[in-house]
Image (tube, grey):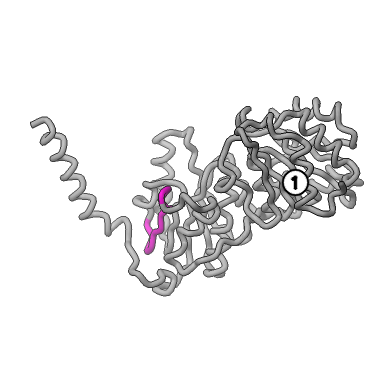
Amino acid sequence: MKNTLILHPIRHMESLFRQWRPRFWPQGSGEHLADQFTVQRILLVSLSNIGDAVLTTPCLQALHHQHPDAVIDIVGDPRSQVIFSACPYLGRLFVLDKKAGWRGRLALMLLLRRQRYDLAIDLRSDWMLYFIRARRKLGKLSSRAGRDLHSAEKHAAALNPLGIQVTPETRIWISPRDRRFAEGVLAGWTERRILALGLGANFEGKIWPVAHFIALVNMLADSFDGVLLLGNQQDASRAEAFSEGCRLPVIHACGLCNLLETAALLEHAGLFVGNDSGLGHMASAMGTPTMTLFGPGLPARYRPWGPSAGWLQSQDGTMQSLTPAEVAAYIRRKWAWVRP
């Protein structure tokens, strides 16, 4: 009797879902959705963390390539929304703030319900598309379907029903103001060989020891003129410790710039070396050769995306056991211009 009482409302909800699903989630046929209607306005729901947001930019580029006249609105996160702010084909930028709780989600959904879209793609959630008014809707690939794909490929695979079968490189758009900021910070250094470093990460277990960074830079010192330290204010103490042991001149920019200013600085670096963090994804998106260090984590899925991105993972899953000599040897093999 108890099980019957539980199952009856569940079956009732399933019946209602099947009845109302076509109204809130229009489905396409087997043919390419892009061939069925003119797309003028698109909504793309991106991810929250900085690196994850960068890995959705191939989708943004692919959509623009297929629909060059369409305006693309984006739902982003308070931390990473600036990644999209200088995109030339961006329409509106909406913010989904998890800290705002259900009231914040409700306010966003009411705002989005006022918009009408030809196409909506949700790469983040399993629920948002039910509240969005769009002629066609595409959800993210399931974890099972995307388990053998890099995250950039998994996100791009959500666009397969549109006839999009490629995964472009990641990209960050920056403004002339951001470039002027970078030139000011790097006054006298813009034509010199710069090694950029990201000393921090979002938790301690992903952070390579400062002493290892010092040893690595001293091994590579003949190939660079100076070191650029990037990160947030929490990385400032590591930056101070690094500066004391480094043989090269150090430009300390931790906590002094926003994400787009950081991207503009990375554009001037000959090489970026850092932990598994958003900075590595940003460097790769700016076309900078990128070396990412992994202890824990899944580099096959979450390493920076692009042909100039290298990575190395320790055998035991700890950052301490990844030696500077191993990293230096990898860098010299991948980038022949780095001197032995």
Q: Where does the magenta region start and end?
A: 133-144
Which part of the image, by quadrant, shows the N terminus? Answer: top left
Tell me what residue is drawn at x 53 percent, y 69 percent.
66
Please state which of residues 295 and 233 is positioned toward the viewer in this rendering. Answer: 295
Regarding residue 84, the answer to whether it shows in the image is: yes
Q: Name which quarter of the figure residue 36 lies in.
A: bottom left
Q: Nearer the viewer, residue 303 or 88?
A: 303
Front-most of residues 60 and 275? 275
- 293 horizontally vs 13: left or right: right
Q: Position of residue 165 (x, y in %)?
A: 51, 66
Looking at the image, the residue that sits furthest to the front is 315
Residue 198: % across, % down: 72, 38
In the image, is residue 60 above or below residue 194? Answer: below
Residue 187 x/y as whole percent: 89, 45
Residue 232 can be seen in this image: no
Q: Residue at x 70, y 34 (%)?
A: 322
Side of 318 relative to 251 (left or right): left
**Could you tell me which secondary element the residue under label 1 belongs to?**
helix
Picture residue at 84% right of the left edge, 40% below the top:
227
Mark 1: which amino acid?
Tyr
The residue that mark 1 highlights is 330
Q: Callout 1: 10 Å neighbours few (<14), some, many (20+)?
A: some
Whether residue 324 appears in magenta in the rendering, the answer is no
